Image: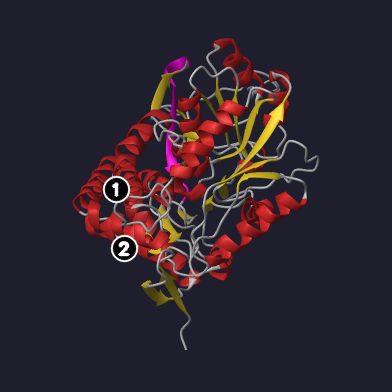
Amino acid sequence: MTDMIVSTEPATGAEVWSGPVGDAAAEVAIARASWAEWAAHSVTFRMETLRRFANVVRAREEEFAELIARETGKPFWEAKTEVNSVIGKVEISINAYSDRTPTSRLEAAMGNKIAVRHKPHGVLAVLGPYNFPAHLPNGHIVPALIAGNAIVFKPSEKTPATGEYLVRCFHEAGVPEGALRLLIGGAAEGKSLASQAGIDGLLFTGSVGAGMALHRQFAETPNKILALELGGNSPIVVWDAPDLQAAATIIVQSAYLSAGQRCTAARRLIVEDGKHEGLVEEITKLIDRIIVDHPMADPQPFMGPVIDQAAADILQDRFLGLMMKGGKPIRRLDRPHEERPYLTPALIDMTDVTDRPDEELFGPVLQLIRVKDFDAAIDEANNTRFGLAASVLTKDPALYDRFWANVRSGVINWNKPTNGAPSNAPFGGVGFSGNHRPSAYYAADYCAYPVTSVEAEVTRAVIGEGLRDAYVPTDD
């Protein structure tokens, strides 16, 4: 009997999609046999094919967004922004490829030339997450296809319908079926795909635990590219913010968008002790107004459910653990419907807890930490093994300069949320948040490798030193 993957709506439990589990080895073999033909096309041909893909998605925007909303539980308005990001990624990636991997020729001595060109790796595996099941894998797939690679894409087992829909759009636009393969499956299929000898690299977005496992697995294959975009425990610092309502709005956006299921979501709110009461009051006013409902509700919610019951159970357990350590709830993480994974946004004061866990609580939980001065705020912001995103809300440019110079993070914002990083800039973190291969605009860097050539039209050479005098025969 064939194993099946079944996807259900977090909001209702209704089935969205089902399909058989795939075979990693078979999909890699197909991609392996197909990639050379795709790579042989000109980069202009590949770019125009990807532009057709953007048009296919644009024509199906509403349908695609509804599928994402149903399968992830995110509000319909937010799902539409994800589809727009899928479309926008094409032109951004075309510009990035031209900018980051240009062909160049330099004149050298004696009429020689030095050329730099780029080649695709071959077959790349892409493992996608469930929180942005179209946008994030698309951010790997588009630049990899432009560079001339073939792809085997395994979407999260929690969002296979979105993954299949995305691949169908690529194929309809003219990307050969052999150049982009879909692998349906769970953790076992992901591990199998990562271990295939026929892949030349793996592009991953997901948890730090899975990223560490992949890093260990690839330790003995330095010939294969590995790009990891992992999680975060991101800080947002508020210091002398002149507008508390605006600051509270930015904090709520940072912590609770996508029900907190963003790797860049603010997990820690760091404030000046004794000057925090007004800010906390504004935050709680907003929290109490947040609509938590199903994706297609009217009025539209700010938050939908988290991805499934297991995720909701884990978050409730972790929140209870914070309270057991001494955290003081300001707004509790409540479960309004026990039968579905809806959670209310939570705020908990962890100032007096000495052993705060440094982990990514992937949901709507924000921890308040009060400190005595700005140096302590910077120390607390850096008090994590992660380093993905950070933000400071302040009217003082000098404080921002200090924050930027001293906080270790791949994204550092000023008077803006921690999340919502632009796609036309590099995106990635340090520490346990990645392996120094930032994605977004810099994805072109890991989708092709540079080849340096010294070229001469005439074969010409001389050895100037280190040879005995040539033997010259005589008539004697």
- Is residue 81 positioned above or below 73 on the image? above
**Image spot of residue 279 (x, y percent):** 56, 28
- Direction from residue 15 to residue 231 in the image, left or right: right
Look at mark 1 in the image and give the residue it sits on: 41
Q: Is residue 5 visible?
A: yes
Which part of the image, by quadrant, shows the C terminus?
A: top right
Q: Point out which mark residue 177 bears.
A: 2
Residue 297 inside the magenta-drawn segment? no
10 Å neighbourhood of mark 2: few (<14), some, or many (≥20)? some
Label 1: few (<14), some or many (≥20) within 10 Å? few
Which structural element holds mark 1? loop
Q: Which residues are magenta?
A: 109-121
Please state which amino acid type lies under the numbered disc 1: His
Locate residue 165 relative to residue 232 in the image: left or right.
left
Q: What is the three-letter code of the residue carrying label 2?
A: Glu
Viewer-side residue, 16 vs 120: 16
Viewer-nearest of labels 2 and 1?
A: 2
Q: Secondary structure at mark 2?
A: loop
- The residue at the far right in this view is 354
What residue is shown at x 54% (from left), y 12% (from top)? 397
Q: Residue at x 64, y 24 (%)?
A: 473
Name the side, left or right, on which 275 lies relative to 172.
right
In the rendered view, would you say 339 is above or below 163?
below
Q: Earlier in the sequence, mark 2 or mark 1?
A: 1
